[in-house]
Amino acid sequence: MSRRVLIAGNWKMNGLLSDGVALAHSIAERAWDKNCSLLVCPPATLLMAVGEEFADTPVAVGGQDCHVAENGAHTGDISASMLADLHCRYIITGHSERRADHGETDEIVQAKAKAAWAAGMAAIICVGETEAEREAGDTLSVISSQCAGSIPDGATAKNTVIAYEPVWAIGTGKTATPDDAQAVHAHIRADLAKRFDDDMAARTRILYGGSMKPSNAADLLAQPDIDGGLIGGASMKAEDFLAIADAVPQDA
């Protein structure tokens, strides 16, 4: 079943106003006629300005995180409804850096995904194993556990995207081989079929999020269960981000 490839850029905590606007402008100028959907998730401080650059272009904007509550006494936090008010269409939930730096559990990730849905957005739910877990041969069991705990009941192909991001490959330059990445993606899809149904599993996009770059994108995106990328460092250069988009197979 055909799934529209999604190439999503996560700028993380990078970029001042002038930098972000310039980068967004460079991407917007060359974002047309891509054989995929494009998404950029800038820091919250840049969402309005970057969103204006992407208005009336094929590039969507998204948030990097949200609070589980819609409003309240949560100093420094941002609710999903606030992100929706800035025309975000997606929210990243459960990124490994949030899990590690802020102690986010599967339960918290699940609650944030529900908050994204309630605000009318899709959740990009991240899962991935550490290097120690990989070396112990626990990759698939860790992924299954995180999916079970982080994906809420009621997940559909419309409101949910899964991102497999091996922790050992994020920002390290290391990348899972296409065969290894495909094996994990296929495992995630099989878990979705068991928990939900075959149709939901077949329609849900599963992204690869471990150091995808122009040099390896084509091989990764050629795999049958890899439906795009959650791009970190390479999304901070318009040429690299768009080169990844150009690597999407024409028959995808």
Image (tube, helix red, strand yellow):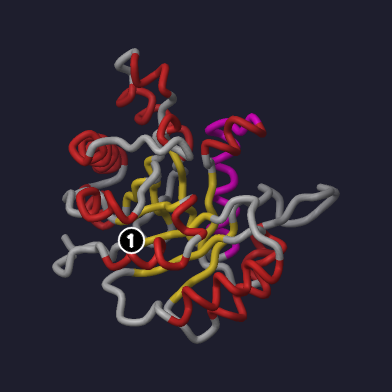
* Disc 1: which residue: 244
Residue 55 is at least partly visible in this image: yes
Where residue 223 appears, x then y in whole percent?
A: 18, 49
Residue 147 is at least partly visible in this image: no
Placement of the N terminus among the 4 image quadrants: bottom left
Residue at image position (36%, 81%) is 32
Q: Tell me which segment is drawn in magenta.
A: 103-119
Residue at image position (70%, 63%) is 16
Q: Between residues 21 and 134, which one lies in front from this camera angle?
A: 21
Q: In this view, does 215 lie to the left or right of 120?
A: left
Query: Is 2 inside the magenta-drawn segment?
Result: no
Residue farthest bottom in this picture: 56
Q: Between residues 51 and 94, which one lies in front from this camera angle?
A: 51
Task: Assign the magenta stretch its main secondary structure.
Answer: helix
Residue at image position (62%, 73%) is 21
Query: Is 104 inside the magenta-drawn segment?
Result: yes
Q: Which kind of residue does numbered mark 1 sit on?
A: Ile
Residue 85 position by quadrant = bottom right
- Secondary element at image label 1: helix
Residue 104 position by quadrant = top right
Where residue 249 appears, x then y in whole percent?
A: 18, 64
Where residue 81 appears, x then y in whole percent?
A: 67, 63
Placement of the C terminus among the 4 image quadrants: bottom left
Residue at image position (64%, 29%) is 103
Residue farthest top in this picture: 136
Where residue 31 appears, x then y in whole percent?
A: 40, 77
Number of on-image labels? 1
> How would you rate the neighbour count of disc 1 (Cα within 10 Å): few for under 14, some for 14-19, many for 20 or more?
many
Q: Between residues 251 and 147, which one lies in front from this camera angle?
A: 251
Q: Between residues 17 and 202, which one lies in front from this camera angle?
A: 17
